[in-house]
Image: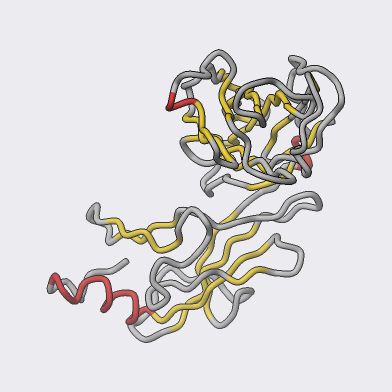
Amino acid sequence: MELVVISLMLWQISVGVKYPNEIVDPPLVLCEPERIVIKIKTSSSNPSHIYADDFADDPDCSSRNMNKVSLRHGKCGMSTERTDNPSGVIQRVCISVQLHPLFVTESDRNYCAQCVYVQSQVLDDFESTLDISDSLPTELAPQFDVQKMPKCSYTIRKGSESGPEVRFASVGESVYHVWRCPGENFGILVQNCFVEDGQGDRILVIDQNGCGVDQYIMATPEYSEDLTTAFQVRQCKQILYHLYKQENRVGKRL
């Protein structure tokens, strides 16, 4: 079964002897800018060993007694493929989940996860659970329905999240930061946002979990019920003053 994330696929196999611990939910895959993170939920203790296939002894490609494994793009046997329609990059990797520390069990699983990063002016990182089939891992060409891919946008607006767009604002004026990715099968999570002063200085304001780093500068975004829109309102003077007070650079624009 295929599920677009922006896009990834997953398969599993079962092997071995019954063991009183098992994977209880479909794995959670996070397609981050520089890595793929796969989280495993079990009925008892954490898996003994999660590793990229053929890299079981590589500490950069495996984890022990943890519920997740983090694999960098281009490492650990991860393949990279470029696509033209839509324009993007596919990252694919296969892993094994071993529950018992010494032997293979019936509840152990092998997974192949595939993330597609579509080129856009807006960060295209999405989080999604995956459905699992009962077949062996199989090489399948990713299929894309371009018409259903979300068209994401980031705008700054005045008055409300649906107000007119603005490019300039006065100190003390409230503006709305608005992220939109409309689509029936998609939800967004705003991650890894920075504020810049136009001279190369960058400060993280929303972290990889979607949380505001400093509530005074930028609070955690609010989301619409259908998760296609996120927004946050800020006063210009708060951002300017807080970022540059200690450096005598209060007058710089962000």
Residue 137, by quadrant, is top right
The residue closer to the viewer here, 171 or 239, is 239
- Give the residue drawn at x 45%, y 53%: 192
Q: On screen, 252 above or below 135? A: below
Residue 6, by quadrant, is top right
The colour scheme used to paint the residues is secondary structure
Residue 169, by quadrant, is bottom left
How far across and how far down the image is residue 123, in percent?
53, 48
How far across and how far down the image is residue 121, in percent?
51, 46
- Give the residue drawn at x 81%, y 28%: 18
How far across and how far down the image is residue 126, in percent?
62, 47
Instruction: Give the residue furthest to the bottom.
Output: 172
Image quarter (top left, top right, bottom left or bottom right) of the C terminus: bottom left
- Give the residue drawn at x 63%, y 36%: 47
Q: On screen, 211 above or below 137? A: below
Q: How many marks?
A: 0
Image quarter (top left, top right, bottom left or bottom right) of the N terminus: top right
How far across and how far down the image is residue 229, in percent?
66, 64
Left or right position of 80 against 242: right
The residue closer to the viewer here, 190 or 165, is 190
Left or right position of 212 against 79: left
